[in-house]
Image (tube, rainbow, N blue to C red):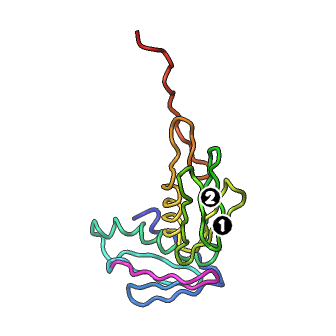
Amino acid sequence: MSRIGKRPITVPAKVQITLDGAKIAVKGPKGELSRELPVNIQVVQDGETLNVNRIDDSRVSRQLHGLCRTLVANMVEGVSTGFQRKLEIQGVGYRAALSGRNLVLSMGYSHQVQIPPPEGIQFAVENPTNVIVSGYDKEIVGNTAARIRAVRPPEPYKGKGIRYAGEVVLRKAGKTGKGKK
């Protein structure tokens, strides 16, 4: 039995769950999410908890058991509290700002990079070097943060670029400076 898959999911009081065969819909104060689960996985609601069970012990069912439980748990957590990713910008002259809902990045290119938020995503700029991506769908929050980071990933020599908060960038030694003979 999957260690992750057998754990029950606690549903907060403000979250509503709708089960319709293989489809699950979760509605809460932050938004609404729905997902189609595989046919060999079923979700059973028991009062204030959800249990994710597999119908048989086939290899595919065992592989999907923990994944589906985590997906459903992320849906419940997302519509109740939401998710966020923090990004840090390092480098002289590199900065971020908001223009309406769009994120505007000045990253040393000849132009500013504008990133419009997908539906359900909000950008916040604490200061010109810290950006917060928040929303209720964990997958979209992570993908949006990765798209922002891809504008200027941290380089290994000086460490300049956009990185996740707490990310460790391995640094390389530069050239030694000795001339050829």
Say left or right for 48 vs 39.
right
Q: Give the answer, above or below, for where 3 lies relative to 156.
A: below
Q: Position of residue 93 (x, y in %)?
A: 64, 48
Q: Secondary structure at mark 1?
A: strand
CA distance for labels 1 and 2: 15 Å
Q: Amino acid at mark 1?
A: Leu
Q: Nearer the viewer, residue 82 or 60?
A: 82
Q: Nearer the viewer, residue 156 or 52?
A: 156
Q: Amino acid at mark 2?
A: Lys
Q: Earlier in the sequence, mark 1 or mark 2?
A: 2
User: Which mark is on residue 69?
Assistant: none
Q: Position of residue 35 (x, y in %)?
A: 43, 80
Q: Give the answer, above or below, for where 2 lies relative to 24.
A: above
Magenta run includes residue 135: no
Q: Residue at x 50, y 70 (%)?
A: 140
Q: Nearer the viewer, residue 11 or 37?
A: 37
Q: Where does the C terminus fall, quadrant-wise?
A: top left
Q: Give the answer, above or below, for where 163 lies relative to 144.
A: above
Q: Furthest residue to the top?
A: 181
> Residue tagged by mark 2?
86
What are the residue bounds of the magenta stretch?
Answer: 27-38
Q: Secondary structure at mark 2?
A: strand
Say left or right for 37 vs 32.
left
Q: Give the answer, above or below, for where 141 lies relative to 20.
A: above
Instruction: Report whether residue 65 is seen.
Output: yes
> Residue tagged by mark 1?
98
Instruction: Report whether residue 77 is seen.
Output: no
Magenta run includes residue 30: yes
Q: Furthest residue to the right?
A: 127
Q: Residue at x 49, y 85 (%)?
A: 25
Q: Position of residue 2 (x, y in %)?
A: 41, 64
